[in-house]
């Protein structure tokens, strides 16, 4: 699913870990920024994050949610969802993607969550190469 297909404000009912007080974000995507998307907080003091589809970073990336997470998104098992991995820029000029804790958005309900998988085979600092 393309981030530009999400139109409006996405609400994260529990916020994002470390940023729980900020619950609403807009997705900003354009051909000039591809393959990246910006999650922009809607308030002046709200944080912004650069994100990328984790399937573009890691071929074969598994995108499955359990029933609890589907309920948190008000989503059904086969409903198309938007998956994003938050990108971190490092001081040495490299960048990494958090594949262990992706952001998942249901465009139908405009609800989002960050899924934190403790037993995930993926890293929080997966190198971006390009």
Image (cartoon, helix red, strand yellow):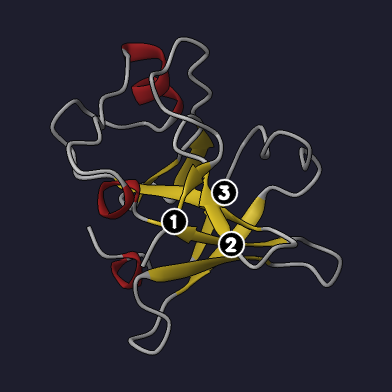
Q: Residue furthest front?
A: 92
* Image side of residue 109 versus residue 24, left or right: left
Residue drawn at (77%, 43%) of the image: 19
- Tag 3 secondary structure: strand
Locate the N terminus by quadrant.
bottom left
Q: Quadrant of residue 59?
A: top left
Q: Are marks 2 and 1 in contact (CB under 8 Å)?
A: yes
Q: Residues within 10 Å of mark 1 (few under 14, many from 20)?
A: some
Q: Residue furthest left?
A: 78
Residue drawn at (75%, 62%) of the image: 91
Q: Which mark sits nearer the N-terminus, 2 or 3?
A: 3
The x, y position of residue 111, in whole percent, is: 47, 44
Q: Badge 3 is on which residue?
A: 11
Residue drawn at (18%, 25%) of the image: 77
Q: CA gap, disc 2 to disc 1?
A: 7 Å
Q: Which mark sits nearer the N-terminus, 3 or 1?
A: 3
Q: Badge 2 is on which residue?
A: 94
């Amino acid at each position: 699913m393309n981030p530009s297909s999400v139109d409006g404000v996405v609400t994260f009912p529990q916020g994002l870990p470390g940023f729980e007080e900020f619950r609403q974000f807009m997705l900003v995507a354009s051909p000039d920024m591809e393959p990246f998307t910006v999650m922009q907080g809607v308030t002046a003091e709200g944080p912004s994050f650069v994100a990328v589809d984790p399937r573009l970073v890691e071929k074969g990336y598994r995108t499955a949610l359990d029933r609890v997470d589907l309920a948190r998104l008000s989503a059904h098992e086969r409903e198309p969802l938007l998956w994003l991995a938050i990108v971190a820029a490092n001081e040495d000029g490299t960048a990494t993607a958090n594949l262990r804790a992706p952001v998942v958005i249901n465009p139908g309900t405009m609800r989002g969550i960050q899924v934190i998988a403790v037993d995930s085979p993926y890293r929080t600092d997966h190198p971006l190469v390009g």
